[in-house]
Image (spheres, rainbow, N blue to C red):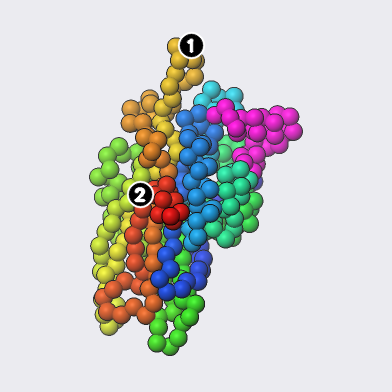
Amino acid sequence: MGVRHDNIRRLINVNLDFDAGETFYIVPWSDWHVEAIDADEDALFRHAEIIGRTKNCYTFIAGDMVDAIGHRDPRFRRTPIKEWFVDATIHEGEEPGAVLADFIAEEVLIKAGIRREKLLAVGIGNHEDSWLKYHHVDIGQLVADRMSVLDRYGGYAFDLKIGFTYRNASSKTGTSCSFVFDVHHGWQSGRRSGGLANQLELELGFSNADAAVRGHVHKKHVFPFDCRWIGNKMDRDWPRLGVVSGTYKLGWREQSPSSHAPSTYELRKGFRPAIKSNLGPPVVVLRPQVGTRGSQPKIEVGWLDSVDTLAQLTDN
């Protein structure tokens, strides 16, 4: 079951109200790989809990929530999903892809307080696409359905437009503004960060999106690009971002001499292992402005290097 989105670019619209001086935190989230033996599940759950409890914090998923491996694969993570998965599929006869969707919705998102209101969109990556090709199950669509955001399911690539409306608008103040994310799970495998920055800068020239978000490469970066918006009567500063959304996959595992588990993809390809303290996504910080005039942007744009930094900032 499932609907392919290969040649369809969905525009997902969401609207948020704001008061003067209010700040919003948007987390571009991808590459969890929850079944993989070298995925840091503790970091994933910790970040989910931070997103769930933080005021004005929202997220969208850009794919690779799961790993396209079966529970008999030695690289399959042993706990806690192993027992959960085996009980449901072997003992109860449920479809494996549906079980994974249940785990993501119930154990990762809902348990952490991330519900429909905080989940702006759901997309898939190459691992969910493999499930769709070989098992005819669209895990991303199932997750969106479980979370009651089926209308915000974007497939492999989508555009997310967040509209901000001022609660106390009058004829003398600006009433609304918006920020657009161009989201694609990604395809590059370059090991140097310069290639990612060059490609993101190029792709921002293909649309009028405010930020281009890419996953897949298991790196975390935010590249700022200073642009100009030229209107009919004035021009203004247009801060734009290229975002690479990180991962929870360490890329290696320590093996004992008696271990027969195969090496991970990253180890075979010679990628540097991830540093645990650097796992997860960056955070885009948006501050909608009221009654903006002149050359100042309608939304002040910034970023934080991690979800843990967000917790340090907002918990104090």
Quadrant of residue 250 in the image? top left
**Is residue 29 something one can see in this rendering?**
yes
Q: Is residue 261 above or below residue 311?
A: above
Amino acid type indicated by mark 1 = Ser
Q: Position of residue 197 (x, y in %)?
A: 28, 49
Which residue is labeled 1 in the image? 258
- Residue closest to the eye, 283 or 87: 283
**First in sequence: mark 1 vs mark 2:** 1
Instruction: Residue at 40%, 44% (x, y): give it.
Output: 246
Secondary element type, mark 1:
loop
Amino acid type indicated by mark 2 = Asp
How far, Cα to Cα, is label 1 from label 2? 39 Å
The residue stretch that appears in magenta: 77-103
Quadrant of residue 173 in the image? bottom left
Instruction: Residue at 54%, 29% (x, y): give it.
Output: 77
Secondary element type, mark 2:
loop
In magenta stretch: residue 79 = yes
Task: Tell me the chief SS of the magenta region.
Answer: helix
Q: Position of residue 33 (x, y in %)?
A: 50, 37
Which residue is labeled 2 in the image? 305
Would you say 110 lies left or right of 56 here?
right
Instruction: Residue at 55%, 24% (x, y): give it.
Output: 73
Q: Position of residue 289 (x, y in %)?
A: 38, 73
